[in-house]
Image (tube, helix red, strand yellow):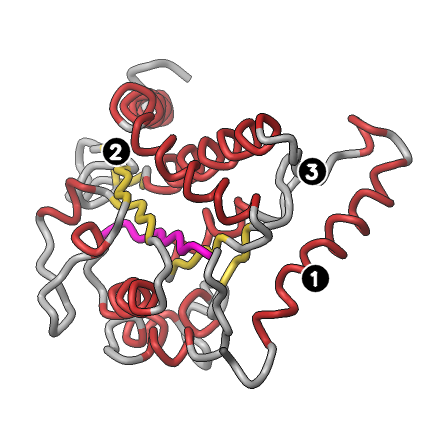
Amino acid sequence: MSAESASGRYLVEAAKIVERIATTQLEAIDAAAAICTQAIGTGGLVHAFGTGHSRIPVEELFPRHGSFPGFHPIVELSLTNHTQIVGANGQRQAMWLEKIEGFGEVILRNFAFGPDDAMLIFSNSGVNAVVIDVALGARERGLPVIAVVSFDHSGKSPSRHSSGKKLIELADIAIDNCTPAGDAMVSIDGLDDPVGPGSTIGFAAVANAIKSQTAEALVALGTPPLVLSSSVVIGDASAQRFDDCYDEQSRRVSRLYDWPRS
């Protein structure tokens, strides 16, 4: 592999994404982490939502090695099932559903959100109806909204919501995943379309930067998080740690299903 090969060019572009995030987005990331620290530190939850491949950073937050309870992934399978592709539960259906206005509110209706909660939404375009619905619904419930979006892609895309709003406009904190419009980054002679999307690189970098900063802030407050750790790090204690983390997450999310809702 060389820097001139397609693989080398992709890795160069991926590194540029991380560098752009490090040089332009740290202030916004730290502000987002402050919201997450407030939520988790007071016993609340940071709800994370994304459709399509934006499901990936949602799962990056928790549960992963090096993550901790308090981040609550909301993954709607009808919007994120990519393995079938065609047929039942196929990609056509998922791409159609994410444009249906009102569906986001139906998803939110399943949860009794608390006064200390926050909402973190990942969307490369930030213009589809479901993510706009979720942002609007979170705001109506009094939750601060953090959005992670490709500013370049969003700026070149019209809103697909009747409000005319984009996710960036509805967020209290908006973070650029620093991915170019269209996502794919590598042009190849003889191929009309670029390949090699970069949004997953940007999303994962932002998600883990927020997570790391939140952990540092919780430690500073004297409430260090309970971290999922590998047996390579803490030996046989890792099995008990997993159980403890899952029990803590269960304690936190149990009130999401309390009825009647307040």
Compared to residue 225, the image places residue 252 above or below, namely below
Compared to residue 75, the image places residue 237 above or below, namely above
Tell whether label 1 touches label 3 (CB within 8 Å).
no
Q: Quadrant of the N terminus?
A: top left
Where is residue 107 shown, x and y percent of the image? 42, 76
Name the residue that disc number 2 marks.
Answer: 178
Where is residue 215 shown, x and y percent of the image? 57, 32
**Closer to the observer: label 2 or label 1?**
1
Q: Amino acid at mark 1?
A: Ser
Q: CA distance from mark 3 to mark 1?
A: 15 Å
> Along the line of sight, which residue is nearer the eye, 23 or 157?
23
Name the residue that disc number 1 marks.
Answer: 250
> Residue at 17% of width from left, 46% of height from top?
153
- Secondary structure of the residue carrying tag 3 is loop
Other residues around mark 3 within 10 Å, as few (<14) / some (14–19) / many (≥20): some
Q: Amino acid at mark 2?
A: Cys
The answer to whether 229 appears left or right of 70 in the picture is right
> Residue at 26% of width from left, 43% of height from top?
174
Name the residue that disc number 3 marks.
Answer: 227
> Residue at 76% of width from left, 34% of height from top?
230
Q: CA distance from mark 2 to mark 1?
A: 34 Å
Q: CA distance from mark 2 to mark 3?
A: 28 Å
Q: Amino acid at mark 3?
A: Val
First in residue order: circle 2 vs circle 3: 2
First in residue order: circle 3 vs circle 1: 3
Q: Does residue 101 belong to the magenta stretch?
A: no
Other residues around mark 1 within 10 Å, as few (<14) / some (14–19) / many (≥20): few
The answer to whether 184 appears left or right of 155 in the picture is right
What range of the chain is rendered magenta? Answer: 117-125
